[in-house]
Image (cartoon, grey):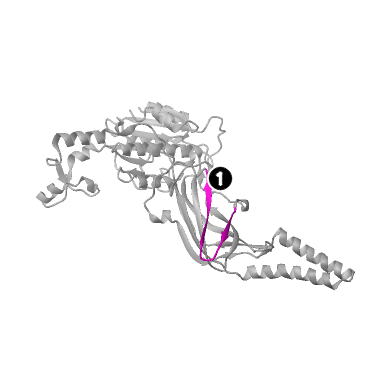
C-alpha cells in the first residue's frame, strides 16, 4: 500500500540488520516477456496493414505492417535476453512494527547493469497477498539509486518475511513488459500493541521495587550493603565490586534482591481454550481474543519494568513463555511477537510433556492470569502459580459480543474443557479475584478499571 495514517514511533531495535534490512546483488529471475496493450495494438495494426497491402496490392503497406510486427518481436526478444542486476535495499520506519499500526518500507534499487528506464515494483509481504495493482513506478538510471515507499497498514503480530521484490521491466516504447523477481528478503518484527496504562513508575502492585531501592540507598548507601556470594543467574548489576574485592570472590547486594520484586503474568496458549480460534493465513491457529490477551500481557509487563520489577510470563502449567527485565524490554516484546497458540514450548498436560519451566512463585509476588476457556487440569495447575501472601487476579476473556462460537481448530473441545463463564466461577471458588472482559473492550480501560496495577 502507498497511503494510510502515520503510526506513532515504535521502540527501536538494536540490530543494524533491521535498519538496512536486506541487500542483494544478483541477477533477477522471471517469466516470459509479454506485449502490453500498446504492443498488442501495434501488432494488430501491423497485421492489418499487411492484409490490406496484400489485397490492394500495396507493397509499401505490407512493408510498413511487417516493420511494426518485427519491432514488437525484437523488443520481446531483447527483454528475454536482458539480465538486469539490481542492488535491493529495504528500510523500515519505524524499524520494528507494532500490531495494528503502520510501518513505512523504503525500497531502494540501484541498477548496476542490464536495467534502465521505467519499472513498476511490488514487494511480497508474509501476512497477505499483494496485488499487481499495488505496484509503484520508478525510473532507473544505471549507477544511481531510485527509491519507492510502501505503507503497510494494520500489521499483524509476528515475525514476518518481506520480499522478494517483483519488478515489471517496461520497454522504453511501452510495447512490451517482463515481470521478474529480484531476490533478497528482509525480516520485519511486529510486537504486540502496548497500551499506556497511566500507572507511572510508582504503581503499588508492580512498583515497590524502585521505591524500596531509593529508600535503602538513602538509608545505608552503597558502602554498607548486605551482601552474599554470587549465584548463577544473578544479574551482573547486583555485583558489589568493593565487597567482591575484599572477599576475593563475586558478591551481590542482598538488599537489591529484596528491593527488586517480581511479578507473574499467566497466559493461556491452548487453541482449544479460545473459542474464536481459526486457521490463520500461515496455517497456524489464530484468535482475535488471544491477540487482545497478548496485548494485555505486553502492557502489564512494560508497566512492571518501568517500576523496576522483573516479570515472568508463564502458561497455566508454569511453562516459561517470556521474561521482562527492566534492562532489556526489547527482548520481552520480541518474545511475545513470536508467541503462537499451541506454542510448542508450553507443557502439554494431556501428553505429560515438559518445557522450560519458570522459576517458582515468590512470596507476595502479584499474579495476574489472562485466560479464556481452560481444561480442568489447567485450572488445578493455575493454583500453583500463587505463593503465600500473593494477590491473585484472573482476567477471563470472552470473544466480542455477537460472536458465534464454533468448534476449536483441530476438532471438538476437550471433554473436560470449560468455557469462560465456568472458568470464572471455578477460579472464584479457588480464591481468585475474577475480572471478566470481552476482547472488544479497550485494554487500558479494562486494566485500569479492574485495578490490576493497584491490587
Quadrant location of residue 369? Answer: top left
Residue shown at 42%/44% (left/top)? 10
As rendered, which of 208 and 409 lies closer to the eye?
208
Q: Is residue 110 visible?
A: yes
User: Residue 231: percent from the left, percent from the top?
Assistant: 20, 48
Asked if 376 appears above or below 19 in the picture, the reply is above
Q: Is residue 346 visible?
A: no
Residue shown at 85%/67% (left/top)? 51
Q: Is 412 on the left-hand or right-hand side of 248?
A: right
User: Residue 130: percent from the left, percent from the top?
Assistant: 58, 51
Check disc 1 and report the residue beneath it: 3
Residue shown at 50%/32% (left/top)? 440
Kind of element beneath mark 1: loop
Residue shown at 48%/63% (left/top)? 24
User: Residue 179: percent from the left, percent from the top?
Assistant: 62, 61
Q: Main secondary structure of the magenta part?
A: strand
Residue 254, magenta (yes or no): no
As rendered, which of 16 and 138 lies closer to the eye?
138
Q: Pick the quarter of the image with the C terminus.
A: top left
Q: How many marks?
A: 1
Identify the residue at the far left of this view. 246
User: Residue 222: percent from the left, percent from the top?
Assistant: 15, 41
Q: Which residues are magenta?
A: 135-153
Quadrant location of residue 299? Answer: top left
Crowd tier of the residue under label 1, counting other residues whose Cα lies within 10 Å: few below 14, some 14–19, many 20 or above? few
Amino acid at each position: 500500500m502507498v497511503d494510510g495514517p502515520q503510526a506513532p514511533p515504535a521502540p527501536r531495535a538494536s540490530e543494524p540488520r533491521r535498519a538496512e534490512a536486506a541487500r542483494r546483488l544478483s541477477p533477477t529471475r522471471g517469466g516470459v516477456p509479454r506485449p502490453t496493450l500498446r504492443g498488442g495494438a501495434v501488432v494488430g495494426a501491423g497485421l492489418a496493414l499487411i492484409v490490406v497491402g496484400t489485397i490492394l496490392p500495396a507493397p509499401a503497406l505490407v512493408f510498413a505492417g511487417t516493420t511494426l510486427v518485427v519491432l514488437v518481436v525484437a523488443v520481446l526478444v531483447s527483454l528475454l535476453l536482458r539480465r538486469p542486476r539490481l542492488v535491493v535495499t529495504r528500510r523500515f520506519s519505524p524499524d520494528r512494527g507494532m500490531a495494528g499500526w503502520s510501518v513505512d518500507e523504503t525500497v531502494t534499487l540501484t541498477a548496476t547493469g542490464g536495467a534502465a528506464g521505467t519499472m513498476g515494483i511490488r514487494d511480497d509481504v508474509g501476512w497477505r497477498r499483494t496485488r499487481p495493482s499495488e505496484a509503484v513506478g520508478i525510473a532507473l538510471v544505471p549507477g544511481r539509486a531510485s527509491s519507492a515507499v510502501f505503507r503497510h497498514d494494520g500489521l499483524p503480530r509476528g515475525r514476518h518475511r518481506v520480499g522478494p521484490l517483483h519488478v515489471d521491466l517496461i520497454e522504453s516504447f511501452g510495447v512490451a513488459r517482463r515481470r521478474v523477481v529480484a531476490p533478497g528478503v528482509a525480516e520485519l518484527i511486529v510486537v504486540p500493541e502496548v497500551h499506556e496504562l497511566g500507572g507511572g513508575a510508582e504503581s503499588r502492585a508492580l512498583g515497590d521495587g524502585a521505591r524500596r531501592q531509593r529508600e535503602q540507598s538513602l538509608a545505608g548507601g552503597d558502602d554498607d550493603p548486605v551482601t552474599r556470594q554470587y549465584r548463577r543467574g544473578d544479574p551482573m548489576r547486583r555485583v558489589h565490586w568493593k565487597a567482591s574485592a575484599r572477599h576475593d570472590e563475586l558478591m551481590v547486594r542482598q538488599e537489591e534482591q529484596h528491593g527488586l520484586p517480581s511479578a507473574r503474568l499467566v497466559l493461556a496458549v491452548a487453541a482449544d481454550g479460545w473459542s474464536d480460534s481459526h486457521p490463520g493465513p500461515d496455517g497456524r491457529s489464530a484468535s482475535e481474543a488471544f491477540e487482545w490477551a497478548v496485548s494485555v500481557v505486553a502492557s502489564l509487563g512494560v508497566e512492571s519494568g518501568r517500576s523496576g520489577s522483573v516479570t515472568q510470563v508463564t502458561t497455566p502449567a508454569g511453562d516459561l513463555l517470556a521474561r521482562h527485565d527492566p534492562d532489556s524490554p526489547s527482548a520481552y516484546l520480541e518474545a511475545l511477537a513470536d508467541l503462537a497458540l499451541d506454542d510448542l514450548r508450553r507443557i502439554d498436560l494431556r501428553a505429560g510433556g515438559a518445557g522450560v519451566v519458570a522459576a517458582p512463585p515468590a512470596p507476595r509476588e502479584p499474579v495476574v492470569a489472562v485466560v479464556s476457556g481452560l481444561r480442568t487440569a489447567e485450572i488445578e495447575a493455575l493454583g500453583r502459580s500463587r505463593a503465600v501472601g500473593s494477590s491473585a487476579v484472573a482476567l477471563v476473556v470472552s470473544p466480542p459480543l455477537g460472536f458465534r462460537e464454533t468448534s476449536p481448530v483441530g476438532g471438538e473441545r476437550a471433554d473436560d474443557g470449560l468455557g469462560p463463564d465456568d472458568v470464572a466461577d471455578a477460579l472464584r471458588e479457588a480464591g481468585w479475584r475474577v475480572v471478566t472482559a470481552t476482547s472488544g473492550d479497550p485494554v487500558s480501560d479494562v486494566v485500569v478499571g479492574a485495578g490490576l496495577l493497584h491490587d
